[in-house]
Image (cartoon, rainbow, N blue to C red):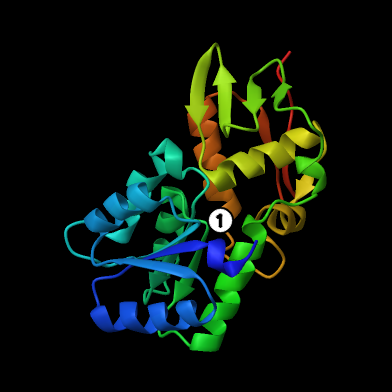
Amino acid sequence: MENNTIKILLVDDEADILEFLSYNLKREGYQVFTANNGKNGVAKAKEIIPTLIILDVMMPEMDGIEACGEIRSIPELKNSLVVFLTARAEDYSQIAGFDAGADDYITKPIRPKLFLSKINSILRRYAPSNDEYNAGSEHSVHFNAFTIDKERYIIIIDNKDINLPKKEFELLQLLTSKPSKVFTREEIFSNVWGNSVIVGDRTIDVHVRKIREKINIDCIKTVKGVGYKFEDIK
């Protein structure tokens, strides 16, 4: 994917941060759009359907966590990546962000080279891949428990559509690619987040918990000290 075809939305209430990040991203050839609070950011995202949304956590009117939740409820934005900017390094901030549907986070203060390297890495993961769990031409995969619709990023249970954020969907798709196989945490991180991404230890647990809550079927099993596996119900 060429940089000049990629839309990036920056949402931050600090004008100097918006100017600084916009300048560096535009130098890389990206299309850059901005908003100065979470409420305006959600509206702008609906308007332009960006490839990547970079959200500050602490903002007036609507903070980044709430804005991310709003974004993840909009079907047209299901494939948009969401990255948080945060000066808060404590675990809570990261967990709350992933819980809301974020794909990654970047901590402040921001160094231009590191920032661009991180953004480029995230966007490389956005490009279509040939990973094993994405292989095959079928648009839907059927199990006793549910059907996975790959094109619409939804799970169908009893004729009801359940929307999942991108990372939750990719995690479930990975686990269901080989029923009964135990996927280690390292395998899950590598396939869903990529080896170059550093995220909190509880990231996978948060995503699994959200999937379990949404599908309400006991088919994702925890293998203590190892990882997770999918077992279709009979």
- Neighbor class of circle 1 (other Cα within 10 Å; few <14, some 14-19, many 20+) is some
Quarter in which the C terminus is drawn: top right
Q: Residue 145 is drawn in which quadrant?
A: top right
Point out residue 128 in the picture as x, y percentages from the top left corner.
70, 51
Point out residue 194 in the picture as x, y percentages from the top left corner.
69, 62
142 versus 42 height, above or below: above
The local secondary structure at tag 1 comes to helix
125 versus 106 height, above or below: above
Q: Residue 17 is drawn in which quadrant?
A: bottom left
Compared across the picture, whether 148 is left or right of 7 comes to right
Point out residue 185 in the picture as x, y percentages from the top left corner.
71, 54
Q: Please name the amino acid that badge 1 sits on.
A: Thr
Q: Nearer the viewer, residue 31 or 164?
A: 31
Q: Note whether residue 31 is visible.
A: yes
Q: Note whether residue 229 is visible.
A: no
Q: Residue at x 82, y 34 (%)?
A: 136
